[in-house]
Amino acid sequence: MRLDKFLKVSRLAKRRAEAKDGIDAGRIKKNGQSLKPGYEVKVGDVLVIHYRTKFLTVRVLMVPERVLPSLKPADMYEIVEERKDDPVDWLG
């Protein structure tokens, strides 16, 4: 499954276009490398997602073959680390 679609299906992004914009801006990385929207997500991938005010590190547990209503987004990944991006640190 493409990275932009995975982010939407797993509800790590609200919309696929929003996921694509974040990927294009380099805010989603794997092993320190920025990814492309067409990157094929695999089980075991560790992704670092930079939201506006936090960093979220997740491990992919499941990549569905197709999207079904019974699919629970929380079963698709586990949160490895969550770190707040404190604006006070920007003044550093």
Image: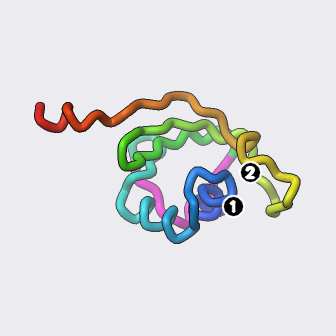
Residue placed most toward the observer, 11 or 65: 11
State the residue position of label 1.
Answer: 1
Magenta residue check for 41: yes
Residue ID at (41%, 48%): 51
Residue 2 inside the magenta-drawn segment: no
Question: Which element carries disc 2, helix, strand or loop?
Answer: loop
**Residue at 64% in and 57% down:** 6
Q: Residue at x 46, y 56 (%)?
A: 35
Going by the numbered disc 2, the residue's amino acid type is Val
Relative horizontal placement of residue 3, taking residue 74 as reference (left or right): left
Q: Give the magenta-colored segment's residue range.
A: 34-42
Distance CA(mark 1)–CA(mark 2): 7 Å
Residue under label 2: 63
Q: Main secondary structure of the magenta part?
A: loop
Quadrant of res 32: top left
- Image coordinates for residue 53, horizontal then vertical, percent: 36, 43
Question: Image height check: is 3 above or below 47?
Answer: below
Nearer the observer, 46 or 21: 21
Name the amino acid type tagged 1.
Answer: Met
The x and y percentages for residue 7 are 60, 56
Q: Residues within 10 Å of mark 2 (few under 14, many from 20)?
A: many
